[in-house]
Image: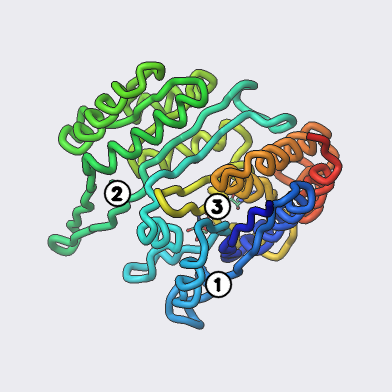
Amino acid sequence: MTNVYKIAVLPGDGIGPEVVEAALTVLDAVQDAVKGLRLEYLRGEAGYHCIAKYGTNLPAETLEMLKETSVCLKGPMTTPEEPGSPVSVAVTIRKLYDLYANIRPCKTLPGVAALKPDIDLIILRENTEGFYFAKEVEIVPGVAVALRLITRKACERIARCAFNLASKRKKLVTYVHKGNILKLTDGIFKQAVLDVAKEYPEVAVEEQRIDAMAMQLIKRPETFDVVVTTNMFGDILSDEAAQLVGGLGFAAGANVGDTYGMFEPVHGSAPKYAGKNKVNPLATILAAKMMLDHLGEGEAAERVEKAVLAVLTEGKTRTYDLGGNATTSEMAEAIAAKILGQEI
Ligand code: NAD
């Protein structure tokens, strides 16, 4: 039997096309190695470079193409910051497909400098509301308000996602809030987590305030398993957690809803490195690995992970951020070669 998957591929801006191409090199090797797996790539345009041509960063053709797929591999995109400019492509796709769970794993990798040798945690960020609901109001010039939307429904479903993940891992959920100040909104979040926790008696629960959590992540990162929090706290904590295990070059993220999944590196478009074939493609390759897991292709995902670990352990092919001088494509080819040579 052959499992055929249509995958939307959005290379994006800056270093995006290079790191996405590297991930496709690895996915091609996986297709060759795993019997009965076929991946069809549907490439679409999206990102800052589209604005001049289409007047938007997410053209209608690309939106139509996404409808043919259930997963998307997305490269980083440059986001304009001027008031009135288009919102980020990632935020638009998250809203369109209600991708409420942002899953960002952080694990110590061999040969990569990390704060502790045994970090293995996931930052799970609610992805659809909080401050990213993006309602800002200017009351009078020089005075503005940002609204933070928190609903019981969204808190419950992200809490359930946290407990489901933790029940298959180290069985600990840490929930992070600022309930002493945001009594109403974070009160709803806290209560939802505690109510859902009752359905998972095998999973331990730990409470942290966001300020203390920022410190605890540095002090004892190895003790955490699944850390669940609201949108902006999760955005900030996940970059902090990425740095604990080697930085943005290794940080992959999944944006998952009930019917669609978008997989991307956490880093941005790093314009100063664009076109130089220099940056680390591992964040995007690990995002592709998460996509295979999401599709239920466990063997394929395992092959990618093992190949990445083998290349890092060997230490011969290393991009500049790892102290080496291998190119983006050389790193991808080394991982692809390991996949093709693997015995599983
Ligand atoms: P950035 O992540 O693009 O780059 C910051 C620095 O991190 C780089 O200069 C580089 O030193 C390092 N870095 C990033 N990716 C790397 C990699 N793969 N390998 C090695 N080193 C790497 O952050 P920025 O400069 O703040 O943002 C640039 C643009 O990207 C902005 O327009 C921002 O809005 C956008 N952005 C997009 C996304 C996304 O599409 N998901 C995420 C973050 C930032």
Residue 136 point in image, percent of width and height: 23, 58
- Which residue is labeled 2 in the image? 129
For the point 60% across and 64% down, the residue is: 11
Disc 3 C-beta below 8 A from ligand 1: yes
Residue 263 point in image, percent of width and height: 54, 51
As drawn, 245 above or below 341: above
Residue 157 point in image, percent of width and height: 32, 39
Which element type, helix, strand or loop, lies under badge 3?
strand
For the point 56% across and 33% down, the residue is: 106
Name which residue type carries label 1: Glu
Sooner in the amino-acid sequence: mark 1 or mark 3: 1
Name which residue type carries label 2: Glu
- Which residue is labeled 3 in the image? 264
For the point 76% across and 36% down, the residue is: 312
As drawn, 53 above or below 6: below
Confirm or deny contact between disc 2 and disc 1 (CB under 8 A). Answer: no
Residue 56 point in image, percent of width and height: 43, 75
Going by the image, does 291 lie left or right of 33?
A: left
Sooner in the amino-acid sequence: mark 3 or mark 2: 2
Question: Label 3 crowding class (10 Å Cα cut-off): few <14, some 14-19, many 20+?
Answer: many
Disc 3 to disc 2, how far (Cα)?
A: 20 Å
Disc 2 to disc 1, how far (Cα)?
A: 26 Å
Confirm or deny contact between disc 1 and disc 3 (CB under 8 A). Answer: no
Going by the image, does 144 lie left or right of 41?
A: left
Which element type, helix, strand or loop, lies under badge 2?
loop
Sooner in the amino-acid sequence: mark 2 or mark 1: 1
Which residue appears farthest toward the left when viewing the image? Answer: 140
- Which residue is labeled 1 in the image? 45
For the point 50% across and 67% down, the residue is: 68
